[in-house]
Image: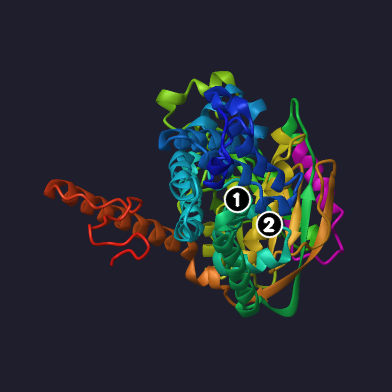
Amino acid sequence: MNLSATDWRRGLGPRFGSRVGPRLDSPWWRGATAVLAGALPMLSFPAPSLWWFAYVALVPWILLVRSAPTGRRAAYDGWLGGLGFMLAVHHWLLPSLHVFTVVIAALLGALWAPWGWLVRRFLAGVPSAGRVLAALFVLPSGWLMVELVRSWEGLGGPWGLLGSSQWDVAPALRLASVGGVWLLSLLLVAVNVAVAVLVAVRSSRVPAIAGLVATAAATSAVWVWSPRPAEDGERARIAVVQPGVIDGAGAPEKRFAREEALTRKLAGQDVDLVVWGESSVGFDLADRPDLADRLAALSREVDADIMVNVDARRSDRPGIYKSSVLVGPQGPTGDRYDKMRLVPFGEYVPARSLLGWATSVGKAAGEDRMRGTGQVVMTVGDGLKVGPMVCFESAFPDISRHLARDGADVLLAQSSTSSFQSSWAPEQHASLAALRAAETGRPMVHATLTGVSAVYGPGGERVGSWLGTDARTSAVYEVPLAHGVTPYASLGEWPVYLALLILAALGATEGVRGLRVRRSRRSGASAPSPHAPRARTVRESPARPGR
């Protein structure tokens, strides 16, 4: 297939045809390219953490999809790109779930099929200025709907949201305090759409540049307007205990002993709270009063409450729970938080009667964990209020937002990524706490068994050093406290509602247009083609039309 100069001016050249890549005419090669293009954004997340790449990472995918010959092919390209994206951001699950990881990625990738159709609908060929401007609103909104749907716990939760790639960028964290990670995703997709138009459609560069300028102006205005967390100089001294990987026979007892030894080193350091990681205690404390007594003695020795995490079958109710339990000088205080949102396949198997076979091909949960029923804010030390979360829950913006609104001074996440030590998962998980801190204006402590442990201030800035996956230690952090409520904590997920409104307006517009076309067809009327030559009368002069 040879394209003429006229075809290129019309926008057919950048359609990834024979001029750009002959093999993309093959559905198989095109599909493979879509998978690779969808995987590119992963480089924006930790561990590579090329945050700047997120502003152009979607451009190859968008260019490929807009060149699709049909809407159906564009939907396929969206689906396959989504498969690549989900597989890339969850690649660390492969050793645990094996081929089932690909199955899950393929199922969730289908969420991007409508987004692919929308990309072609607004950007195919030579889009008008109006279509480009509409694309700058519609395509980010469509992407956000995909993120919203897949953020449901049963579909894997909000791991790898595009906006979370900006966890270490101060201006982006400031925006997160206004609209959360959702606002960051919206802006990133809008920039990618504008860049794709600048690259591929010369005649539509003016509206693309206008979109970039408007985005920059809006974000600058938000930067100036948005209130900062009101720090009053108060600090809490919080210690994190990270024992490292302990496997083999008797691992729960050995882990407890090492945590005990590491905690004992904190004596005399004037700490307000000691935090152990997820599953740090493998026994129900009511069944093991000897362990409860050892923890109480340890609390007296370091002169601070200890937040442990019990992963065990409870004695007072059926089932296994993962629970944040506060232990003071007199033993367990009675404050307890049972994990509410469980990791699919890791802590329970959805529709186990149908998908229980996953336990035979990977490390899926042999028995479902039980769910808690509500969030808890605990008071420790001299009135410090802390809001605990367990592992996976730190990925959910709404959990930390509700804890902040309920009065938590400090957010805590107890985690363990011991199964994924050699992957990018520990760094990526630790980075999420920076966003939760910035969104709520509350400092956050991310304490793990095996690393990476991290602490962030009220604006999402790092406090102290990370404890990497090779660290077996305890560390004390001076955590700055802040008061007041961020716009995001107050208003909630307003960018999501804005995206829904934009898509609803699009649906209404398309519906009205379709209704008009049907009415026109029923009436038998046919509108003149805008490209048809104007009819002339016998009295017209070729030199002076209309006369």
Q: What residue is drawn where x is 33% and y is 54%? A: 530
Query: What kind of residue is marked 2?
Result: Gln
Q: Is residue 262 magenta?
A: yes
Which percent across, then down, holds residue 413?
A: 65, 53
- What's under tag 1, amino acid-wise? Ala
The quadrant in which the C terminus is found is bottom left
- Identify the residue at image location x=67%, y=46%: 415
What is the secondary structure assignment of the residue under circle 2? Answer: helix
Q: Residue at x 63, y 50 (%)?
A: 199
How many other residues sit within 10 Å of disc 1, few (<14), some (14-19) or many (≥20)? Answer: many
- In this picture, which residue range is highlighted in magenta? 254-274
Q: Is residue 261 left or right of residue 89?
A: right
Q: Residues within 10 Å of mark 2 (few under 14, many from 20)?
A: many
Q: Is residue 244 magenta?
A: no
Residue under pointer 1: 196
Horizontal arrangement in the rendering, residue 293 relative to residue 29 (left or right): right
Judging by the rendered image, the residue that carries numbered circle 2 is 166
Which dot marks residue 240? Answer: none
Residue lying at 51% horizontally and 63% vertically, measured from the top left:
402
The answer to whether 457 is drawn above or below residue 533 in the figure is: below
Which quarter of the figure has residue 190?
bottom right
Quarter that holds the N terminus: top right
Question: Looking at this view, is 239 or 91 the one in front?
Answer: 91
- Using residue 171 as the reference point, say whether residue 506 is left or right of it: left
Image position, residue 479 (x, y; %): 76, 67
